[in-house]
Image: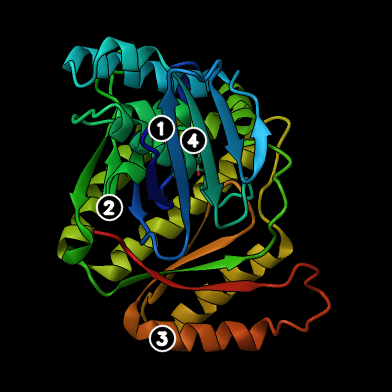
Amino acid sequence: MADIITAVAPVNIAVIKYWGKRDEELILPLNDSLSATLDTNIMYAKTSVCARPDFATDEIWLNGKKESFESERLKNCLISIKKKAAAEKSVNNDFLSWKIRVCSENNFPTAAGLASSAAGYACLVTALAKLYKVNSDVSAIARLGSGSACRSIYGGFVQWCAGVDPQGVDSFATQIVDSSHWPEMRVLILVVADHKKKTSSTDGMKISVQTSELLKHRVQHIVPKRIDEIIDAIYDKNFSKFAEITMKDSNQFHAVCMDSYPPFSYLTDVSHTIIQLIHSYNKACGEVKVAYTFDAGPNACLYMLQSEVFVVISLLKHIFPSSNPEFVTGLTFIPEVPLST
Ligand code: PMV
């Protein structure tokens, strides 16, 4: 009987966004990015893999539905892990030649800008690494599935270094600090809409790289400075500095989407209301207590310290009562998510 290997991988939420590739196939980014990896208790992908000599083909099921294994990204991840296993001689060649079955599920909306592909590919690569007994860093392999997936391989605050090598050997993720460094940090996810986004991040990035002047400026002059500043803010546990950079970077990423031609937008009226609400709240507090950030979708991720969670949830529930008919899909609160170690 062949072993079934199961892995769980969490979502990560970028505070300095990755947007734009310099190599589409190897998924090499134009700029460094930085994120926090959430605890696996609430939002995660779970993947089981199994290899057997009697399997005729590689097969995959995603959220209960059989999907094609023909995706280049999927195949690249499998080939790269097998290459690593062969180099490390961690399993024998017979085992490497067997076909596999993959079964993966997310416990949160797929492709609604909630980093589902990041958790999904990080999980697949972690499960495959266990199956083939690979011991070295696999974040560069997760990157081949979905760029941001490389950051979900590690917990705490994680930086993905863009690197300069054309083959991407220096484009991988490293942990800045683990979650014990800043144990009061919390993330609140507000699900504004859970349907699939119109412009995928892959398509959106292509349009921005080809047309946005703002993206060029951001990559050259803004992100390098912001990465240094936010790492300092994390080391110093300077929440208001951390929050200000996070919000500015989210805003600039969405401005790049609007600066692309044709423009596209991931934010909805509800997202904009949340942005204004957070600024009003911070103003009323007299200091920056909460930060918002939005990925390629309308859902808000709010960073705050534990001491703020109760008041912020009460405020959001007051402003967005679930019975409000304006919100067709409603606002769902995923309880605050502590960072993973
Ligand atoms: O990894 P992708 O292709 O899903 O791109 C993700 C891009 C953003 O979520 C918008 C930003 C980021 O750094 O996670």
C-alpha span from label 3 to label 4? 32 Å
Image side of residue 39 versus residue 117, left or right:
left
Q: Name which residue type carries label 1.
A: Val
Q: Residue at x 20, y 49 (%)?
A: 176
Residue under label 1, please give it: 219
Say whether mark 3 is within 8 Å of ligand 1. no
Q: Name which residue type carries label 3.
A: Cys
Using the image as rendered, state which of residue 241 and residue 21 is in the foreground: 21
Where residue 207 sits: x, y (%)? 63, 26
Position above or below: 141 against 281:
above
Q: Are marks 1 and 3 in contact (CB under 8 Å)?
A: no
Q: Residue at x 74, y 41 (%)?
A: 198
Residue under label 4, please give it: 19
Nearer the N terminus, badge 1 or badge 4? Answer: 4
Using the image as rendered, state which of residue 280 and residue 95 is in the foreground: 95
Position above or below: 67 against 70:
below
Image side of residue 106 versus residue 285, left or right:
right
C-alpha span from label 1 to label 4? 9 Å
- Neighbours of disc 2 within 10 Å: few (<14), some (14-19), many (20+): many
Nearer the N terminus, badge 1 or badge 2? Answer: 2
Using the image as rendered, state which of residue 134 and residue 4 is in the foreground: 4
Asked which quadrant contains residue 298, the reply is: bottom right
C-alpha span from label 1 to label 3? 33 Å
Image side of residue 35 versus residue 49, left or right:
left
Say whether mark 4 is within 8 Å of ligand 1. yes
